[in-house]
Amino acid sequence: MDTLARIPQLLVYGVISGSILSLGGIGISLTYSILGFANFAHGDIMALGAYITLGVLTLLGGWGLTNTNFGPLSFGIGFILALVISMGLTAAAVVLIDRVLFKRLRRTGSIILMMSSIGVALGLRNILQFFWGPQPHYYVQGIQLATQIPALGIRVKPDQIFIVGTAVLLVILLHGFLQYTKIGKAMRATADNMDLSRVTGINTDRVILWTWVIGAALATAAGALAGVENKFITPELGWQMLLSIFASVVLGGLGNIYGAILGGMVIGISEEVSTAFVSTGYKPAIAFIIMILMLLVKPTGLLGKRR
Amino acid sequence: MDTLIGIINYVVFFAITAGTYGILALGLNIQWGYTGLFNIGIAGFYALGAYATALVSGPPPSAWDGRIFGGFELPFLAGLLAAIVVCGIVAFLIGIPTLRLRSDYLAIATIGIAETIRLVLKNESWLTNGVWGLQQIPSPFYDPIHGGVKAFLGNHPDLPGWIHSLFSKAYNWFYLFLVLAILFVLYLIIERLVHSPWGRVLKAIREDEDAVAMSGKNTFSFKLQAFVLGAMIMGIGGGLYAYYARFISPSSFKPLYGTFLVWVMLILGGSGNNKGAILGSFVVWGIWAGTDFLTEYFPFSATQAASLRVIIIGVLLQVILLWRPQGLLQRERKPSKTL
Amino acid sequence: MSLLRVEEVTSGYGEMEVLHGVSIEATSGEIVSIIGPNGAGKSTLMKTIFGLLHPTGGTIVFKGNDITGFNPDRIVRQGMAYVPQVENIFPSLTVHENLEMGAFIRRDDFRGRTEEIYELFPILKDRRKQRVGKMSGGEQQMVAMGRALMLDPQLLLLDEPSAALAPNLVDMIFSRIIAINRTGVAILIVEQNAKQSLRLADQGYVLAGGRKRFADTGQNLLANEEVGKLYLGG
């Protein structure tokens, strides 16, 4: 197919991929802005969320809750339910990890925390592999028919619209939370200045709790949506996306949530469009190159430091 | 008697791998232990070193190979030299844009570098034979030693069975000697370097880079030197691996696992302490090998056992970070600090 | 009625002792000024009182309760508020949101209090939706003080409130400080701008080398020749 003619379709793939990268990236920027370290375990938290969703889904299926699908989508109410439950379970797991591990290491500095998070990343991945095995697990069954939009030269599947729509919805909810709720404002205040937060009387422990919960919930959504898009998941899911997610976050500005969204879209689209010119095997390398260029030109990212 | 021989042979094999990891740990120690560079891309240099060695010392492309490059069949030292040079050049090129970055960014960048190296090794079949890997890498002095031992055993068929078992693996003994000798030499060289004025600057940079910069020194240049030197040493480790394994492919260098293992070795042994780096590699490799035996006693599948072993090392790391982050052998303290 | 009593407090950073046994006192509704050269330990004293540093010796009694060694989050609940010298506002939040954060631990409806703060600082009234990071130094200082007042403290600690301000704004800030005091809040000020802060002080202390050198009313200290020569620039 003519290279230029492929681009609109690749843009579509880019938006879908970008939505997932954005959801993953927001969690990393959120953690970074409040807790001050880059959480390398975030990709594997996404994988954890994806697998827990699958597990809950299977459980619900046993109770006959997954039989009907929403119209043209590959899944029905069961999936939504499983996703919400899974967000809670994953958040609980992440809070546990923080209590047991990261909280005690907070005083020692960001490098030790990063090191620890790498250990957690590998640990989570292998726990998933221990229980589910390295082989792919299927998320949705069957082949879905794509709708053609000849005017734009693209084909879109209903599932893909759902992915982008869910991402948009979650971002809007997050924005509302941060702007209009007391704890949301406290999170923004703590991201500005944790010491001043304490002096003001803000309960920073509660802020940190919410940070992990929201980050984990978004990661779960990102992992599950990746499962819907790729049709199957493996324990390596998180690691495979981690470099692209970090690139998105750095591109947008580490610690800046809106930067993570912008960066996610740019990286997602760049990766997909690059496949018209370069072998698909190099997609993560594209993200990496963009990130390095950003770091050379403006290390604080497109939108600057944490908002 | 046979079990004893079996154990001895296993210990030799164990020590070769532990020694190779020790070399990697020494390299990381220069970068992180002494200079404070958070390099998570160890596997990249390890792989580069192995591939450089294999391409220089290995046989030319066969009819089945996808590659068209390499296979100069050069001897051992040339192979190691190739590893050193390639790693040095690559480290220099990537060091220039990345070493000015803060630790978090540097960590992310080094992961990206290792991944990119892995992708290049996997995709550029014309150079590396892609996923099929490089075969028949000749171990140094294999033919003379193996042939000699075989001849000796052949001429003395009356020797007891256990001597036959012992000597049949005689090449491994030689290789172990080789690895330990190189490890020792590197240790001496590095010890010399870190206790020199150059080394003191590195340590000062780790403590307080701004202060060093203000005293007029070009901290970036020093960091680059440390980074390149560490990478070259890691390349030697990769080369030694290639010569021993005699076959390498991109899957021999699973992303992050090797890197992670070396980090745990250095942290457990004691970052900033070269003896610690070597001690750590033997201890952690011992634990890793130990978990191999342990999992045999439980009804786990092969992949489950593999996962469990990684989880154990992961937990080990957290335990160290929580209770003894300085490691077994502490960083050597400057005299002024104890006053 | 004695509000704050600091007795023979020693404090410092790690192994470095900065305060070598300082005693000061503040009564309800008073303005107490602490002046002295750089490095005298003025800020250290303030941080120790608020619990950001824990004293190695001595006691601190607030409203009759021993608060020695308490952490800031406990002290703030006792009715004391603190405005740091630098980074004392949340730049990415609006004026109104900064005040809201000040009232974080309040469980009641504090809208009335917010309006009172806007009465004290009328300039902020029209700017309530503005992001504080974009405001001038003087406006930020007012937001910082307003934030601290949201909890109706009996004692307000101000660490060098005029430090980063242009001279014409210094007067404005001091006038706001007097206005705050008139609402019944006792104020403890640490200041480089010695003369002006002594002028509005009911009680003044001169700190030097980690020790109390002089203690008297603000007026008397201003008139004191020795104090004038050593600490007020003649």
Image (spheres, grey):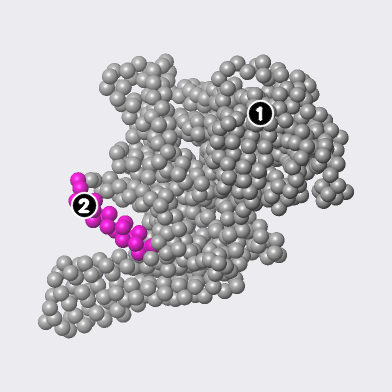
Secondary structure under the numbered disc 2 in the rendered image: helix
B294 part of magenta stretch: yes
Residue marked by disc 1: C1
**Residue C14 in picture, x, y percent from top left:** 57, 53
**In this view, the mark in front (1 or 2):** 1
**Residues in magenta, as a range:** B280-299
Q: Amino acid at mark 1?
A: Met
| Marks 1/2 same chain | no
Question: Which residue is at the front of the view, C41 or A194?
Answer: C41
Res B296 label: 2
Instruction: Answer whether residue B24 is visible to the viewer in this image.
Output: no
Badge 1, how many Cα within 10 Å: few under 14, some, many 20+?
few
Question: Which residue is at the front of the view, B250 or B65?
Answer: B250
Q: Amino acid at mark 2?
A: Glu
Residue sitting at 50 percent across and 72 percent down? B190
Residue sitting at 76 percent across and 40 percent down? C216
